[in-house]
Image: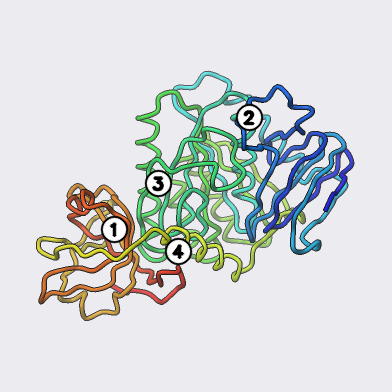
Amino acid sequence: MIRNIEKGNTLIIKGPARVSLLEGELDVLGKIFQSKNENSSSNIPDGEDENVLIIPSAQCYPFYAIDNIQLEIYTSNEENLKEIEENSISPTWVKIKNELIAQLKKERETPLKIMVLGFSSGKTTLIKYLANNFIKEGLKGGYLDSDLGQQIIYIPTTINLGTIKDYIISSEDIQSENTLFIGATFPKGDYKYIVSLSCRKMIDDYIAENKDVDFVLIDTDGWIKTEAGIVYKSFFIKSVNPDVLIAFHNDEIEELKEIEKNAASENKQRKIYLIEGGNEHFYERDKDERRFLRQSQFSKKFEDFRKISIPLKEMKFIKTDYNKENEEILEQEVNVNDLINLPYHYVIIGLLTEDSKLIEIGLLFTINAVKNYILLYSNISYKQQLKVKKILLGSLRLSTKGNHQGYLYL
């Protein structure tokens, strides 16, 4: 269908959909698109069209008309289109963005760490909006995605950090440079400490290796509404120590107010922005859609996997543990005979080198102690197989299509 949008209006489109800009100029989360006749000087390679956006299922993009625009839209359901007579990006977001850009342009000894916190949707959208506007200003930085269940950079059960090299609209627009395998989609138990300390190390390593970056954007999950959620988020903030905290504030969520209070008292120099109230234009996924997205990400990752047999001899099975007294992450070896007696089949695993560097993830099929081999599902090469010395056990069990099969309790 052809759809005309007047200047100043926003068309919010839920996927799956394919959208082409035919006329005019529009803004999608800070990235500017111009029609070909207005962008004739652009050096676009043959066969590519930067004015075409693919919106995946369970995703929602706002198309703000900078001037009158014309779109060609392919969608199976016209109810997935919603036009509003304003910019879906609120003035509060614009104000925060402008203040952060001004701060980033001042000379600093270290990059600005900016963390986004909240219970409901909007966190990742705000991260993209800030990233795109920072890039537009010539600023350089990284994106840390700590949300185990709804990853944008890689797959669930991992945390990732990558450099923002271009505008970010979809997950295809940023690649992980450092992946840490956690093995769960929710930071339960000691995972809340393991994730927090791992994120701190990832940020410290990234800043040490990238001397010219101006910022690190830190995306978080929405686990807040429990006592454990307060402990987790407060420990995460203390560990990562962001210079700027942006919180989607909700007066009805007492746990969130407690986290914000802890963050303010812990570091008096920290700038805290509270975004009051919700945004009716944000699309909040339900549990089924979040589950579908996770399954889709796993399924896509597993497409190139195959069954691989590797020797069991001298292979270590480990799990991550947390020493609360020393606030450190430990590796605890798991006895293979104890593991065999558990429902371990199809558990997600991290394949590690001797010094615990992640080579690849996989699914554990069979441990044959009699014939001394392990059967797993992955895509590692023969040379990579020779480097695998440790198997880090996750807690999530999946089918080869990414469907949830249960848990491994160690």
- Determine the secondary structure under disc 2: loop
Quadrant where the C terminus sits is: bottom left
| Residue for badge 4 | 186
Quadrant of res 29: top right
The answer to whether the residue labelled 4 contacts the one labelled 2, judged by CB atoms less than 8 Å apart, is: no
Distance from the alpha carbon under mark 2 to that under mark 3: 37 Å
Q: How is the image coloured?
A: rainbow
Q: Position of residue 142 (x, y in %)?
A: 48, 36
Is residue 315 shown left or right of residue 78? left
- Determine the secondary structure under disc 1: strand
Which comes before the other along the chain, label 1 or label 2?
2
Mark 4 against mark 2, which lies toward the viewer?
Answer: 2
Give the number of the disc on residue 322.
Answer: 1
Q: Where is residue 234 in the image (x, y as percent from the top left)?
A: 47, 52
Q: Residue at x 65, y 50 (%)?
A: 54
Is residue 311 shown left or right of residue 406? left
| Residue for badge 2 | 44
Mark 2 against mark 3, which lies toward the viewer?
Answer: 2
- Determine the secondary structure under disc 4: loop
| Residue for badge 3 | 199
Which comes before the other along the chain, label 2 or label 3?
2
Mark 4 is on which residue type? Phe
Mark 1 is on which residue type? Tyr
Mark 2 is on which residue type? Ile
Which comes before the other along the chain, label 3 or label 4?
4
Closer to the camera, 153 or 78?
78
Up/down of 18 relative to 27, above or below: below
Q: Where is residue 345 in the image (x, y as percent from the top left)?
A: 30, 75
Closer to the camera, 205 or 315?
315
Mark 4 surroundings within 10 Å by alpha-carbon count, few (fewer than 14), some (14 through 19), many (20 or more) = some
Q: Which residue is drawn at 23% across and 60% down?
A: 391
Mark 1 against mark 4, which lies toward the viewer?
Answer: 4
